[in-house]
Every structure is written in structure tokens, then in C-alpha cells.
Amino acid sequence: SKPIVAVVGRPNVGKSTLFNHLAGQQISIVKDTPGVTRDRIYAEVSWLDKNFTLIDTGGIEPETKDIILAQMREQAQIAIDTADVIIFITDVRQGLVDADAKVADMLRRSHKPVVLVVNKVDNFEKLMPDVYEFYNLGIGDPIPISAVGKLGIGEMLDEIVKHF
Ligand code: GDP
Ligand code: MG
């Protein structure tokens, strides 16, 4: 069956924007029900001659800072358990934050293939210097993209399908 690619990252980094772009449509997010397994959103994606199933583990994003890390850990664990490749998304505007480092540690220990993506690089020339700090996560080369500007998407997809 088709490889599964899961998207993880902090609230507001652009997971849904990227997901909807790759899905080729707006896919509305179903509300979580307390006590029930977190909803996952699926899309079928093709790149060149490769097909894969993309999963957004985000669901409804928490608004309380205290539970952001807990939810990120939960998302990352779902991705580790179910995905063949994990897209870990960070935000160049926010920079590297502690929660990113903690989730990166989890992903590294899982030995699953991880594609590290730095989103909101809307102007490559201006913002590339800010991308380099993400090397410090120790999970590989950061790939700059702009999900809104649709920049770097092909390079990101090339990296993803290399792992199939
Ligand atoms: P999620 O919480 O990770 O799913 O993030 P969303 O996809 O909901 O995006 C959060 C906010 O970031 C929205 O206002 C998006 O329009 C914005 N955003 C997403 N991608 C980009 C990008 O590439 N550049 C900029 N400037 N904003 C972006
Ligand atoms: Mg979202």
C-alpha cells in the first residue's frame, strides 16, 4: 500500500496551509471529541511518479500554552506510530523554540525518516540567514518553504519521496 507521510509541528506554523496546498483543496478540520482518539485528516498526494497518503495530525489547535507541548508530543507519537516519513514543520518568524527541540528529540530517537521544513520563508534572499539555526535541532538539513507563497514545495517533495 501507499507510503504514509505525517505532518507535525507547533500550532500556527502553517501545517494546515501546507496540507491544503498539497491536497489541492481546502479540507475542513473536524472537531476533536474529548476522550476519543484525535481526529486525523487524510489526503492523497502525487509527486512525479510517486503517490502517498498525507496525514495532518493537528486537529484543533490548543490555545493554552501549557498544553501545546503535550499535544505536540501526542501528534509526534501518532506520526511515529503510523507514518513512513514525518514532515516536521517549524516557523522562521518564531525561530527555534524549546518545544521544537523537545519534539525533535522524540523524532530523532524514533529513527523514522524526518524531513525538517522551515515555513514562512516568504523571501528566500532576505530570510535564508534565519533558516540556518534550525540545523541545531540535529535532525538534518532544514528545507525552506513558503506555504502561502508556494516556494520551495518541489524541493520539499523531492526530499520526502527519496525516503520511499
Ligand atoms: P497550523 O496551526 O500549523 O495548522 O497553521 P495554519 O496553516 O493554520 O497557519 C497559521 C497562520 O500562518 C495563518 O495565518 C497562515 O495564513 C499563516 N501562514 C501559513 N503559511 C505561511 C507562509 O508560508 N507565510 C506566511 N507569511 N504566513 C503563513
Ligand atoms: Mg492547523
Image (cartoon, grey):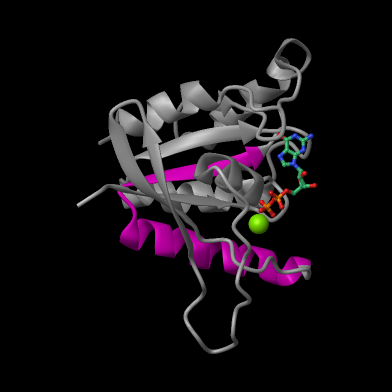
The outermost residue toward the left is 1
Task: State the image quarter where residue 49 is shown.
Answer: top left
- Indicate whether residue 143 is drawn in magenta: no
Give the camera-side residue of 21 and 88.
Answer: 21
Give the camera-side residue of 56 and 72.
Answer: 56
> Image quadrant for the C terminus?
top left
Task: State the image quarter where residue 151 is shown.
Answer: top right
Q: Is residue 129 above or below residue 105?
A: above
- For the point 71% across and 26% down, which residue is it? 121
In the image, ligand 2 is in what quadrant?
bottom right
Q: Is residue 106 above or below residue 141?
A: below
Counting the numbered discs, the total is: 0
The outermost residue toward the top is 125
The outermost residue toward the bottom is 35
The location of residue 152, given as percent across then percent down, is: 57, 22
The location of residue 4, given as percent across then percent down, is: 33, 51
The location of residue 17, given as percent across then percent down, is: 66, 45
The outermost residue toward the front is 25
- Indicate whether residue 74 is drawn in magenta: yes
Apparent side of residue 61 relative to residue 37 in the rendered image (left or right): right
Give the camera-side residue of 89 and 60.
Answer: 60
Give the camera-side residue of 53 and 163.
Answer: 53
Boundaries of the magenta span:
65-90
Q: Is residue 32 above or below residue 132?
A: below
Q: Main secondary structure of the magenta part?
A: helix
- For the point 71% across and 69% down, which residue is it? 62
The location of residue 105, given as percent across then percent down, is: 47, 49
